[in-house]
């Protein structure tokens, strides 16, 4: 086996595992907590955990780092909504919809990254749509589709997926060509943390930080670690090993199987009726990246 391919496989296994576990810890960290404060803590702690990566950075100019500010702004909004949704709705219902970012990423990649449109990829979009319709347990396909499109948590997670796709496209453009991935990630996490901290000060929620840490410190530590290093693995895969963004993100969809398994085991959620929908979404992600 080619050594580069082996590294890519190992990196993606690590990313999928961390992403799947991250959602569980995000849900626990955000339970009965202010979503703004929870998101700030998750990113601030993650930024601190990334500091050791400074020993492996190589400065390549300031231009690319300025785009870390842009992507940081997008991610700030996305992850506040993300934590709120995971904290207030069933993780096994809403978390698969996060993977809808592959659909948005497909469109944005064609428009801004000059990636080629394939009809087989369009079939993947349809599988994703059908898969989401089966996530909520209703008697008919029509009712299932209506449930997903009208459930507030589902709609918010779809918005998150769009914002994440925008951020990923920014990552793909500038990390690959101009910026060290480790330094890019560190700056981005601190940018997000700064935005959120300013919002906390404006809304006078500073005192809530101490309460949140005291009651959920373990989940904040574990969730932050999983979030930070799953993102590092993504950046490494596309910047150092040359994996296409439109392939790396669909592969990340495998994490939903990890989340659903952990949701059943740790959170005691009933997922039997949603497994088919999750599998169809996974098939859709695979179809999106097939090239003929």
Image (tube, rainbow, N blue to C red):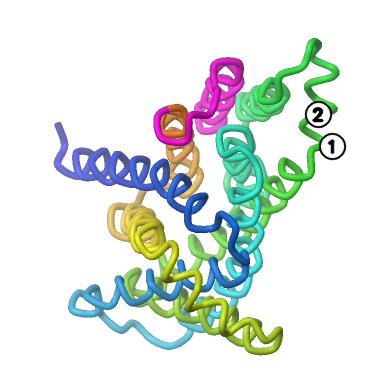
Classify 140 as above or below 34: above
Secondary structure, mark 1, is: helix
**What residue span does the magenta drawing correspond to?**
265-292
Question: Where residue 242 sits: x, y (%)?
Answer: 34, 52
Checking the image for residue 246, the label placed there is none
Question: As displayed, is residue 229 above or below residue 263?
Answer: below
Decide whether residue 259 is among the magenta residues: no
The residue nearer to you, when weighing 78 against 170, is: 78
Count of numbered circles in the view: 2
Please indicate, yes or no, whether residue 175 appears anywhere in the rendered image: yes
Do the residues bearing badges 2 and 1 touch, measured as CB atoms within 8 Å? yes
Circle number at residue 150: 1
- The residue sitting at 60% across, 70% down in the picture is 76
Question: In x, y percent, where is residue 179?
Answer: 38, 75
Alpha carbon distance from label 2 to label 1: 5 Å
- Residue 284 falls within the magenta-colored stretch: yes
Circle 2 — which element?
helix
**Which residue, given by chain and number where applicable, does mark 2 sit on?**
147
| Quarter of the rendering occupied by the N terminus | top left
């Amino acid at each position: 086996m080619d050594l580069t391919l082996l590294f890519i496989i190992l990196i993606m296994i690590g990313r999928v595992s961390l992403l799947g576990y991250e959602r569980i810890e995000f849900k626990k960290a955000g339970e009965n907590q202010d979503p703004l404060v929870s998101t700030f803590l998750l990113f601030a702690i993650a930024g601190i955990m990334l500091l050791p990566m400074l020993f492996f950075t190589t400065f390549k100019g300031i231009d690319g780092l300025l785009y870390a500010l842009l992507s940081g702004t997008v991610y700030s909004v996305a992850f506040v909504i993300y934590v709120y949704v995971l904290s207030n709705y069933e993780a096994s219902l809403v978390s698969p919809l996060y993977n809808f970012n592959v659909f948005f990423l497909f469109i944005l990649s064609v428009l801004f990254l000059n990636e080629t449109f394939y009809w087989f990829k369009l079939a993947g979009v349809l599988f994703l749509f059908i898969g989401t319709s089966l996530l909520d347990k209703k008697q008919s396909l029509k009712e299932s589709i209506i449930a997903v499109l009208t459930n507030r948590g589902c709609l918010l997670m779809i918005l998150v997926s769009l914002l994440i796709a925008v951020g990923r496209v920014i990552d793909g453009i500038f990390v690959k060509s101009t910026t060290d991935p480790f330094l890019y990630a560190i700056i981005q996490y601190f940018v997000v943390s700064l935005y959120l901290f300013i919002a906390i000060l404006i809304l006078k929620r500073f005192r809530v930080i101490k309460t949140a840490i005291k009651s959920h410190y373990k989940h904040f530590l574990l969730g932050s670690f999983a979030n930070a290093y799953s993102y590092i693995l993504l950046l490494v895969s596309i910047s150092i090993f040359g994996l296409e963004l439109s392939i790396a993100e669909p592969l990340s969809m495998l994490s939903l199987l990890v989340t659903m398994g952990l949701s059943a085991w740790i959170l005691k959620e009933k997922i039997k009726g949603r497994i088919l929908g999750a599998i169809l979404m996974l098939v859709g992600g695979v179809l999106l990246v097939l090239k003929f």
